[in-house]
Amino acid sequence: MTVHQCPKCELRFTWVTELEDHCRQDHPQFRHDYPVRKPAAAQRQQPAEEDTKEATSTFRE
């Protein structure tokens, strides 16, 4: 079972939406937003455009 604890107090919640509502109501000055970006693993898995061109030209020769 996942438990979401408030970063500003000792309260714990079953649902993340409950935690978000609690934070908005009881800690309005506090912002706990995460930056939006791709995970590092996903960035490493995407081949560079040059690598793709080299691989396709090798197969065509």
Image (spheres, rainbow, N blue to C red):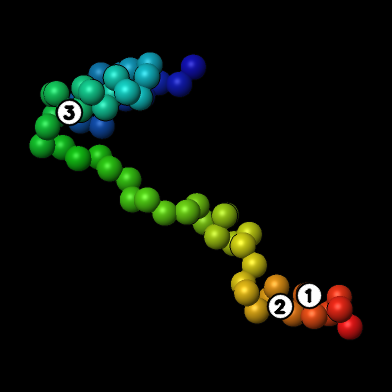
SS assignment at label 2? helix
Sequence-first tag of 3 and 1: 3
Q: Are marks 3 and 2 in contact (CB under 8 Å)?
A: no
Instruction: Kindly indicate the quadrant of the structure image that contains residue 26.
Output: top left
The image shows residue 4 at horizontal and vertical percentages of: 36, 24
Instruction: Assign the C terminus to one quadrant of the image.
Output: bottom right
Q: Give 52 or 22, whichever is nearer the viewer.
A: 52
Disc 2 designates what residue? Answer: 53
**How many labels sit on residues?**
3
Image coordinates of residue 32 in percent, x first then y, are: 25, 40
Residue 15 figure quarter: top left
The type of residue carrying mark 2 is: Lys
The residue that appears at 16% across and 37% down in the rendered structure is 30
Residue corresponding to mark 1: 56
| Amino acid type assigned to the residue bearing label 1 in the image | Thr
Q: Mark 2 touching mark 1, by CB under 8 A?
A: yes
Which of pointers 3 and 2 lies earlier in the amino acid sequence? 3
What is the crowding at mark 1: few (fewer than 14 residues within 10 Å), some, or many (at least 20)? Answer: few
Task: Name the residue: 14% across, 23% down.
Answer: 25
Residue 3, x across and y down, in percent: 40, 21
Label 1 element class: helix
Q: Would you name the residue on which mark 3 appears?
A: 24
Q: Nearer the viewer, residue 11 or 49?
A: 49
